[in-house]
Image (tube, rainbow, N blue to C red):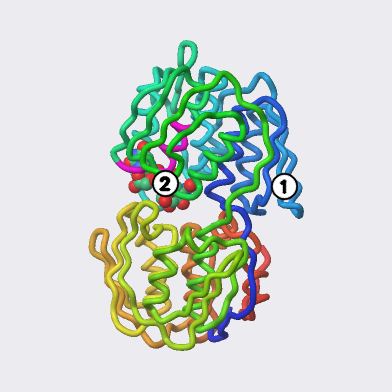
Amino acid sequence: MVGGTPLSGEVTVTGAKNSVLKLMAASMLAVGTTTLRAVPDILDVEIMAELLRRLGCTVDHRHRAGTVDITVPEDLEHRADYDLVRRMRASICVLGPLLARCGAADVALPGGDNIGSRGLDMHIDGLQRMGADVVNEHGYLLAASAGRLQGASIWLDFPSVGATETILMAAVTASGTTVIDNAAREPEIVDICTMLTAMGAIIDGIGTSTITIDGVDDLVAVEHTTVGDRIVAGTWAIAAAMTQGDIIVRRANAEHLTIALDKLQTAGAIVTCLDDGFRVQMDRRPRAVDIVTLPYPGFPTDLQPQFIALNAISEGAALVTENLFEARFRFVQELARLGANVRTDGHHALVRGRSTLSAAPVEATDIRAGAGLVLAGLVAEGTTTVYGVSHIDRGYAGFIPALQSLGADITRAEG
Ligand code: UD1
């Protein structure tokens, strides 16, 4: 790509990767056909579809329509093998539904993004409190319950998105009441709770830190439209600010990005809320802005690399604090290849803005780092090549065509 063109025009965001993968897993809780809409055409959806097929489901993914039909049989397999799970950490979200449906789940320890240790202790502890035996053997989590899982009171040490989802999906058909305290409040958690409720689950406190679930005997398959991807929407917002452009982002909910959009305004952008999204305009070089990543509604860690890229070309200096994934700053080494001035110390990064970046070959190491590097390349002088684009494909549907439609001088090399 050749940097220097302000991006302008409209983009429409599809459903959220971090929701749809869990919705696909949740579909296994009901026999019959679940239909999911606004499904993004991304690699992780393919991986999850393949995983569900191996577990005995039929998955019909109609790409262009953005619809996935998942037909779930009475009897499911309960083993999720390493060859698929290692490609995507979100595979762990089959653990709860499989245990609930089959009384057993053998799930390979996941791989996925290279952004830190990403423990599973809270998932395991939650299921154990519900009466399951969970052991870690030969690279697999082996979970089993004699009879139905039992409702329990579970306090999470940290509002983990994944642990909240695992416990939720195990609890909806458990016997009795489960209370999750210090639960995650992300819009993707609200989305899965909305779908589970439509399926017949009884859930109280959706979107708050205390979720109460009264277990029911059976759930039914439903149709559900995936919540819009706030991280993709936020990436477009940052792209507009960085390139001094003007982007209208459709099918996005500005309320899901309150802090990120507020930070962009502090950086000098004009943000306007629209009925079905928002518009970000920028007519000056951004000012550097401090950010601190935190669980929702805090600033999302998944927008941190993109924001470091913005700070790298801003006026002044900013401190970025990463509280979720310790290795997320690895991408800074790649950004430095474009001339960015970033010093990291533990979970802090001090970014001193430069008036220009200079194009270079760089390597994407995870989805969001990849997006951050593309944004940096779009403002760097000269031709930047980003390697490892397959990482970006995992989270951004049609990223490069969308950038082209906004005026970016970018192409994808074959092979
Ligand atoms: C999800 C998102 C990811 C996002 C993250 C935080 C998906 C597929 N991924 O990841 O894009 O960056 O939320 O918003 O939805 N932890 C433990 N023990 C546990 C669980 C988590 O120590 O049992 C730690 C993790 O190592 C990490 C932190 O808690 O440091 C946050 O993890 P969590 O909220 O669970 O994130 P994920 O569900 O993995």
Q: Which residue is mark 2?
A: 185
Residue 150 location in percent, x, y? Answer: 42, 18
In terms of secondary structure, where does tag 1 sit?
A: strand
Q: Which residue is mark 1?
A: 67
Helix, strand or loop: magenta stretch: helix
| Corner quadrant of residue 60 | top right
Left or right for 300, reference 6:
left
As for residue 163 lying within the magenta part, the answer is yes
Mark 1–mark 2 Cα distance, whole angstroms, equals 26 Å
Residue 356 location in percent, x, y? Answer: 42, 86
Query: Amino acid under label 2?
Result: Arg
Residue 233 location in percent, x, y? Answer: 54, 64
Mark nearer the N terminus (1 vs 2): 1
**Residue at the (76%, 47%) spot, across then down:** 62
Name the image quarter holding the N terminus.
bottom right
Regarding residue 274, the answer to whether it shows in the image is: yes
**Residue at the (41%, 58%) spot, across then down:** 300
**Residue at the (47%, 57%) spot, across then down:** 366
Residue 388 location in percent, x, y? Answer: 54, 61
